[in-house]
Amino acid sequence: MYVVIRKFNRMRSVAEAARRAESGLGQMLKQTPGLQGYCVFDAGH
C-alpha cells in the first residue's frame, strides 16, 4: 500500500481541488491496475 499526501497552497476551495484531482491525476490513476481509490480532504490551515 502506498499513500501520497500533497498540499495545495493556492486552491480557493476543497471543491476546486477535488475537480482538479478528478480531471488530472484521477484520470491517470483510474488506469492503474489494483487501484482501490483516492481521496481529497480538507486538513484545515
Image (spheres, grey):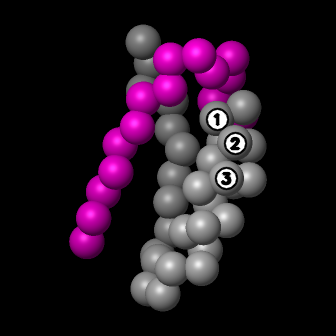
Q: Nearer the viewer, residue 6 or 13?
A: 6
Identity of the residue drawn at 72% across and 32% down: 16
Distance Cα–Cα, label 3 vs label 1:
10 Å
Quadrant location of the C terminus in the rendered image: top left
Q: Amino acid at mark 2?
A: Arg
Identity of the residue drawn at 51% across and 38% down: 41
User: Residue pushed farthest bottom?
Assistant: 33
Instruction: Give residue 7's quadrant in the image.
Output: top left
Distance Cα–Cα, label 3 vs label 2:
6 Å
Callouts 3 and 1 close, C-beta under 8 Å: no
Q: Is residue 34 above or below residue 11?
A: below
Specify which label sits upstream in the sequence, 3 or 1: 1
Callouts 3 and 2 close, C-beta under 8 Å: yes
Is residue 11 in the magenta section? yes
Q: Position of residue 38 (x, y in %)?
A: 50, 60
Residue indicated by mark 2: 20
Callouts 1 and 2 close, C-beta under 8 Å: yes
Q: Please state if 32 lies on the left or on the right of 20 as rendered.
A: left
Quadrant location of the N terminus in the rendered image: bottom left
Q: Residues within 10 Å of mark 3 (few under 14, many from 20)?
A: few
Q: Position of residue 15 (x, y in %)?
A: 71, 33
